Amino acid sequence: MTSKAAIYPPLPLPNEMTQFFWDGCQARKLMILRCKGCGRYIHYPRPVCNGCLSTDLAPAEVSGEATLYGYTVAMQAFHPYFADKLPYTLALVELVEQAGLRLTTNIVDVPEAELTTGMPVRLVWREVAPDLVLPMFTKAAS
Amino acid sequence: MSDNNRVAAVGVGYSTTGRRTGLTSRQLAVQAAMAAMTDAGMTPQDIDGATMLWAVAGAAPPGLDVVDSMDIAYMLGIGPLNFWNSGAGPAYIGPAVQAVAAIKAGLCHTVLSMRVIRQRLTTAEMLAQDTDANPEYADDDRQFVMPFGSVAPLQAIAAMPAQRHMDLYGTTEEHFGRHVVAQREWASHNPDALFRTPLTLDDYFASRYISKPVRLLDCDYPVDSASAIIYTTEERARNFAKKPIFVESTAFSSVKYATFENLDDIYENSPVHCAKTLWSRTDLKPKDVDCVQLYDGFTIIVFQWLEALGFCGRGEVGPFVAEGHTAMGGSLPLNTDGGACNVGRRHGANFCIESIRQLRGGESGVRQVPDAKVALWANAVGPFSGAMLMTSE
Ligand SMILES: [Zn+2]
């Protein structure tokens, strides 16, 4: 399967509920929507808190500390951008702020043999394409 | 369930099935519907309901025609309809549950329920796209996953849960391989299967990784296909050609939202909820099940269902499969048609049809489970799923 390396991965298409997240990435701040009533974080963003049903929500910056919840080492590309990025580690990390609060991300700069479910990871920023900054994670110093 | 308001399946049928058949969606649907009516010994005038899911699982090749349940009724001279629905998902369990519910509610008496699925774009076709000239935009919740390379369903549906199951419970790649080999053995005896050559564990380990630990042989096989099952009331069921097979219990579940990437643990996902509901609606127990047909889009989905339904303990599915319980001659015959990995991605309908054929008896050759009276089939996984328990009496 030959194809020229693509510059762009699938690009986020923000809407009025999600623009803050991508503005935060450009500023290298990880912002998650949070309920002002009960303090619960809501991700993916929704217009109501599913804990207390408050609609008074606002983005809040989180620490970037997390644990590795799930991961896979991708060996095949399904989009031209990833054809020359293999293998890459797709992951789900759980942010320390709240049980069950998880982000899809990539783990970078960690050898495959060191990946383990539950390992502590920390936020790093990567500009993967012009004007596209993504929150990724790497092994946290123990 | 001993009420006299039971629903029965009385006809089953498939279209031509294969890669890029050259047939339109309408042609595929007509083939399957006519096969099911012929199987039941039924005419279009016997039918007053239609449910269907038409969808491509993934990116669609250009130019496909769409068929819906009103159109299938129009084409075949069925109607007027007392109940219909198109786009009921996920997989075939959607149209099946809707058919059963509509009959139980008295909205109609006999429903043609269908799944029509077209082969998605191949990987080569996806990679050939010029995505810089025509960028792919990820909207809604997909914007939080696709930029990171979560672009193929198997990565989130299968690879991450499989890796987690391995890390937490000691499940091994050999366990996955044992399932793949056992399932192919069933397929080797099924004339409808697209893959019939027996496999060894070495063949499994020689199969390339798609996303670790998922290998090519863990994945079902995308095809063009239509499947049809006809349900009716218990009262009418005995008027038709084949032995009626009864719906003993059914359950339909969703948890969280309809994306796979950010789900909770396997043990909090919809199959667990669905299984609890299914068993709560019957006096039957897992030990009463003679054969089980579980969605095998990817191997780990089968493993999740085996645990969720209580056929083995939490975290114990790997050894359970490796001990041979689900293979030919085992205590729990599983995917006795060979599963979607081998008969093609008929998107859940094959599990229903195989259950019905096993319970009728005499239609499965050497695959026949002796004296099969209770079959269980389940579809989908993760945020949504459904299951049905069927009996021959
Ligand atoms: Zn709240």
Image (spheres, grey):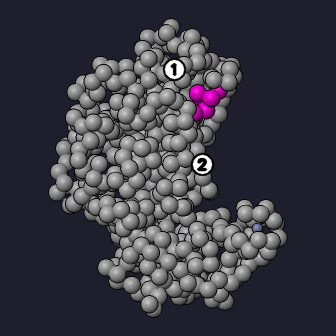
Q: In front: B314, or B158?
A: B314
Identity, as a three-letter code, of the amino acid under mark 1: Ala
Provide the secondary structure element on which disc 2 rests: strand
Asked which quadrant contains residue B89, the reply is top right
What residue is disc 2 on?
B254
> Residue at 55% of width from left, 32% of height from top?
B281
Describe the element under mark 1 as helix, strand or loop: strand
* Chain under disc 2: B
As drawn, the residue found furthest toward the bottom would be: A141
Q: Please provide percent x and percent y for residue B313.
A: 38, 50
Could you tell me which residue is drawn at 49 percent across and 21 percent down?
B246
* Quadrant of ligand 1 in image: bottom right
- Residue B106 counted in the magenta span: no
* CA neighbours of label 2 inside 10 A, class few (<14), some (14 to 19), many (20+): some
- Residue B97 falls within the magenta-colored stretch: yes
Give me the disc on residue B252.
Answer: none
Please give the residue where the numbered disc 1 appears in the rendered image. B8
Range shown magenta: B96-102
Image quadrant where one finds the N terminus of chain A: bottom left
Q: Horizontal and vertical percent for residue A43?
A: 65, 69
Q: Amino acid at mark 2?
A: Ser
